Image (spheres, rainbow, N blue to C red):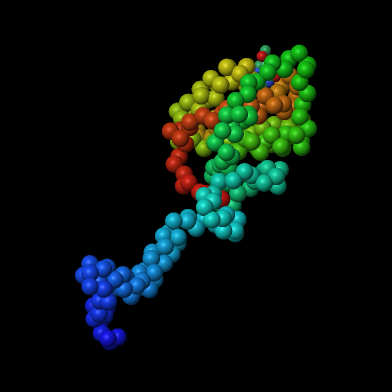
Amino acid sequence: MLAGSVGDFPCVQPHSSHCALRASALRCLALAPALCVRRAAIRNERRLYSRPNVRVHGLEHEGDIGARDPFEAELTSNFGDKVLGNSDTYHIIRGPPRLKELVGLATKRCVPCENGNATALSEPEANKLRGQTPGWRIIHDEGGNLVLQHEWKVNNFTAGLQLFARIGAIAEVEGHHPDLSLENWNQVSAKLMTHSVGGLTENDFILAAKINALELSDLLPKKKQRFWA
Ligand SMILES: C[C@H](O)[C@H](O)[C@H]1CNC2=NC(N)=NC(=O)C2=N1
């Protein structure tokens, strides 16, 4: 009575459907281990492919897709100016999407600083604001005053003049103006300082952030997008 396949088991009840039910239940039981193994394999496969295996700073953050706020050390170390390889490659550290709208420098307006109410920022204060204006660096002019500078290599001389025009339009709206130069036909430089104060004020960083928000891709050579985090 015990030998053979499931179908050989005698039906102990006269009612044939009960017998069929019992036989199919036994068949399922017999198949269960194989089904369990298969289902576990599918689950495992899905688990492996459903979580992006993203490595951030040598750690594996499951589900973390990458962008993060800059660390304090990166901000104060002008990280953006010291990247390896192509030093003028854009490394955009993306904060939470609404951060810029709420508190970003680009949303602020320059304030008139003729009435002596503005004072020049100290170098540490300037360095802190510089962290919000990637691509700009702080240099000293011949008088030792702090200046915020950005250089672009544009496609051609005409692109340089167009870049002047786009920067000039913002400067006129804000009532705050950079010193612009176009040399060697495709090297544009913008230097920002608050002349009435003889140093850097928040106005300079606001204008720099607004210039950073300009769409300039049509004026600049295509560059390889590099991501670091
Ligand atoms: C009257 C006018 O608003 C002032 O002269 C503005 C014009 N643009 C300016 N631009 C800059 N960079 N510094 C200034 O002090 C300044 N002053």
Tell me residue 184's x, y (percent).
53, 35
- Between 88 and 43, the residue placed more toward the observer is 43
Residue at the extreme left of the image, as rendered: 16
* Residue appearing at x 78%, y 23% in the figure: 119
* Residue appearing at x 52%, y 52% in the figure: 63
Determine whether, in the image, residue 167 is placed left or right of residue 127. left
Res. 198 in view: yes
Determine whether, in the image, residue 37 is placed left or right of residue 172. left
Instruction: State which quarter of the image contains the N terminus.
Output: bottom left
Res. 209 in view: no
* Residue appearing at x 60%, y 58% in the figure: 59
Tell me residue 58's x, y (percent).
59, 59
- Between 8 and 222, the residue placed more toward the observer is 8
Residue at the extreme top of the image, as rendered: 115
Above-or-below relation of 88 to 150? below
Tell me residue 29's x, y (percent).
34, 72
